[in-house]
Amino acid sequence: MARPDPDSYFMGIALAVRARANCTGRRVGAIIVRDYRILSTGYNGTPSKMRNCEDGGCHRCAHPDRYTSGEGYDVCVCVHAEQNALLAAARFGVAIEGCTLYTTLQPCFGCLKEALQASVAEVCYLHAWQSRFREQYDALVERLGAGRFRRVAVDDPAAVWAAGRAGDVERALGHEVLDG
C-alpha cells in the first residue's frame, strides 16, 4: 500500500470521524490540523448529553414532514461537524489560528463564517455543493482566499449513507450537489 499524501490522509481521518455522526439529515466529519498534527475533531449531531438525533433528540430531524424544506433550522438542535471541531478546540484551550479545516462536506455559510472568525487559514472539503446565495458565499471564500478553499478528492464508499435524508432534498434547500 502506498503512503497517502497529507490531504488524502487527513480527509480519510475526517471520513472516519464522520462515522460517529448521528444526524438523520446528513452525516459530516471534520478535523482541524496544524503542522501535520490533528488538534480537534467534530461530527454533526445533537449537543453532548442530549438524546441523539437518530433517537429523536432533534424535533426537526425526527419530524421533517412538519417543516418546509430549508426552514426550521432555528429549532434544529444538531451542531455541525465544523462547529463541533471549533468548539472542542475552544473548550480544551487549543488555539487554532492558522490551522487547516478538513471536512467531508463543503461548509455551510454559517460554518464558513465561524471558521473565518476563528482565523482558520485553509478549508479543504470532499463533497461540493452550490449555494443559491452564491454572491454572499463567494465573499466569504474570497476573504479566506480562493487558493485556500479547495476540494480534496478521495474515494468515499459511504457517500450515499452520509447524505442521509438530505440527499433527497438538496435542491429545495438551496444546496445543489455538484459531485456524486
Image (cartoon, rainbow, N blue to C red):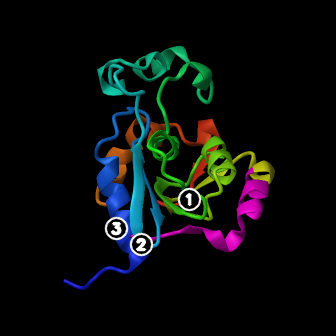
Q: Is residue 24 left or right of residue 118?
A: left
- Image quarter for residue 71? top right
Which label is found at residue 36? Answer: 2
Q: From the image, state whether disc 1 or disc 3 is nearer to you.
A: 3
| Most foreground residue, 178 or 128 | 128
Under tag 2, what secondary structure?
loop
Residue at position x 33%, y 25% in the image:
52
Magenta stretch, residue numbers: 137-154
Quarter of the image where the C terminus is located: bottom left
Badge 1: residue crowd in 10 Å (few <14, some 14–19, many ≥20): few
Residue ID for mark 3: 155
The residue that appears at 79% across and 56% down in the rendered structure is 139
How far, Cα to Cα, is label 2 from label 1? 29 Å
Can you tell which quarter of the image residue 95 is in? Answer: bottom right
User: Residue 174: horizontal and vertical position, in percent?
Assistant: 65, 41
Vertical placement of 150 versus 101: above or below?
below
Q: CA distance from mark 1 to mark 3?
A: 16 Å
Classify the position of the N terminus by image quarter: bottom left
Estimate the spatial distance between the alpha carbons at disc 3 and disc 2, rounded to whole Å. 21 Å
Residue 145 in the magenta stretch? The answer is: yes
- The single residue placed furthest to the left in the displayed view is 1
Label drawn at residue 178:
1
Q: Residue at x 46, y 72 (%)?
A: 35
